[in-house]
């Protein structure tokens, strides 16, 4: 019996999201033929335009629909006519929370031909991974206002940490470090235990306890401010970082710039449990000012599609895409910046498809 097709959903989203999604799906179509697997895609119109038209963020039955899929590809969300936070909280965070995507995985790898702002650094120096807890911390939305809009206003935003949330993220990070193809085999916890002495003490104690089960993995600890300095000064030190939701949000943006910008950075929101549904996305946002101009860089979206395949049982296809992308960035593209790539959005996708057949 032939293998069942990959059951996928795409949420192209807003701005340039549909444009980069189109290129990622183009690459998926090409690699599926080369590697001999099949897939089925259901495209969903969730995003700013639908919200403005219907008032819906996630339609009734939408989460149940996604639970029938093996993975979700998200192009981008962010609409200039929708107030900040509405789409982010009501769509993106809800998908992460409701699908229990408790791992945010961010590879940080400098590709050939891509410029980094760090002088004298190359692809051998910037190649690490950030594992960010994805369902707790300040993002839970616990808090409120007192006397809002007055001179005596009080705003409270509470960070929530659970032993379960800490342990499952930390344990996954240890497993990932053990399997990662790196001679360092080092997992670094990034937190702020000297100031956040309750929640981050829980992270620290959990990290120490779980580490006993992984004697083959070296461990280290950085305060988050020290991590930001060391990522700039010595990015080659890092192998895998595990950190909290809030700090992970910040340091992965810094890491994105180190690897050449959001035009190449991709990430995954993982539910690694049996039957879990994960979601993969480029990290660059919707970039509405570039909508329809054929100038936005699709490499991040293509990298996200490679991650989707890696975590959906097609590692050979993922590796082949990664090799093709490295060839294109190293030999064809002038820049990763929108409008300065030397090729249009669709043309870059075509270059990757061409490279797949050659490599």
Image (cartoon, rainbow, N blue to C red):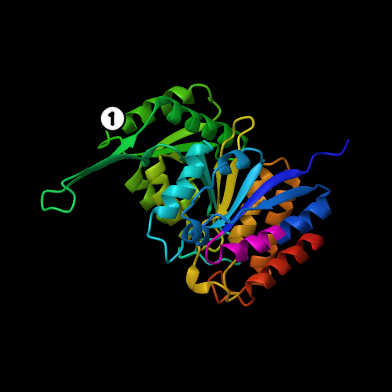
Q: Secondary structure at mark 1?
A: loop
**Left or right side of 356 for 209:** left
Up/down of 26 relative to 67, above or below: below
State the residue at coordinates (55%, 37%).
Answer: 185
Say whether residue 240 is visible: no
Instruction: Report the residue at 61% width, 34% height from top.
Output: 276
Residue 21 in magenta stretch: yes
Which residue is painted at 30% across and 35% down in the image?
Answer: 193
Name the main secondary structure of what is drawn in magenta: helix
With respect to residue 46, does 314 lie above or below?
Answer: above
Relative to residue 204, is residue 182 drawn left or right? right
> Foreground residue, 142 or 45?
45
- Relative vertical location of residue 339 with respect to residue 217 in this rendering, above or below: below
> Which picture quadrant has residue 111?
bottom right
- Image: 299 above or below 5: below
**In the displayed structure image, the side of residue 267 where residue 229 appears, left or right:** left
Magenta residues (range): 13-25
Q: Which residue is the extreme one toward the right?
A: 1
Give the residue pinned by disc 1: 198
Seen from the viewer's position, the closer of residues 202 and 222 is: 202
- Comparing 120 with 278, the one in front is 278
Q: Quadrant of the C terminus?
A: bottom right
Q: Is residue 73 magenta?
A: no
Q: Residues within 10 Å of mark 1 (few under 14, many from 20)?
A: few
Q: Position of residue 1 (x, y in %)?
A: 88, 35
Q: Looking at the picture, how far across and down is residue 110, in whole percent?
A: 56, 58
Q: Residue 92: image x %, image y %?
A: 48, 49
Q: Is residue 6 visible?
A: yes
Residue 299 in the image: x percent, y percent?
A: 61, 62
Q: Is residue 116 left or right of residue 142?
A: right
Instruction: Place residue 34 in its image quadrant.
Output: bottom right
């Amino acid at each position: 019996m032939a293998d069942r097709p990959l059951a996928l959903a795409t949420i192209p989203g807003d701005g340039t999201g549909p444009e980069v999604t189109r290129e990622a799906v183009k690459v998926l179509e090409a690699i599926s033929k080369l590697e001999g697997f099949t897939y089925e895609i259901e495209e969903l119109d969730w995003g700013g335009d639908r919200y403005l038209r219907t008032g819906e963020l996630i339609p009734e039955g939408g989460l149940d629909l996604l639970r029938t899929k093996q993975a979700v590809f998200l192009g981008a969300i962010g609409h200039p006519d929708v107030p900040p936070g509405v789409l982010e909280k009501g769509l993106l965070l809800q998908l992460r929370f409701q699908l229990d995507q408790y791992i945010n995985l961010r590879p940080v790898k400098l590709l050939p031909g891509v410029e980094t702002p760090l002088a004298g650094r190359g692809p051998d120096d910037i190649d690490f991974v950030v594992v960010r807890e994805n369902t707790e911390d300040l993002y839970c939305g616990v808090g409120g206002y007192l006397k809002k809009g007055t001179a005596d206003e009080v705003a409270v935003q509470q960070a929530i940490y659970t032993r379960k949330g800490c342990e499952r993220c930390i344990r996954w990070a240890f497993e990932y470090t053990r399997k990662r193809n790196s001679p360092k085999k080092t997992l670094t916890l990034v937190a702020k235990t000297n100031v956040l002495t309750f929640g981050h003490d829980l992270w620290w104690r959990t990290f120490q306890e779980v580490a006993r089960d992984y004697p083959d993995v070296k461990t280290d600890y950085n305060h988050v401010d020290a991590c930001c300095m060391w990522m700039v000064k010595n990015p080659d030190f890092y192998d895998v970082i595990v950190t909290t939701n809030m700090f992970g949000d910040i340091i992965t943006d810094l890491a994105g710039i180190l690897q050449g910008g959001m035009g190449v950075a991709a990430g995954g929101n993982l539910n690694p449990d049996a039957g879990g549904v994960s979601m993969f996305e480029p990290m660059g946002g919707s970039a509405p000012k570039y909508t329809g101009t054929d100038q936005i860089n699709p490499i991040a979206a293509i990298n996200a599609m490679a991650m989707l395949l890696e975590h959906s049982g097609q590692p050979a296809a993922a590796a082949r895409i990664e090799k093709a992308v490295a060839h294109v960035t190293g030999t064809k593209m002038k820049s990763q910046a929108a409008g300065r790539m030397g090729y249009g959005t669709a043309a870059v996708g075509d270059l990757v498809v061409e490279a797949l057949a050659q490599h």
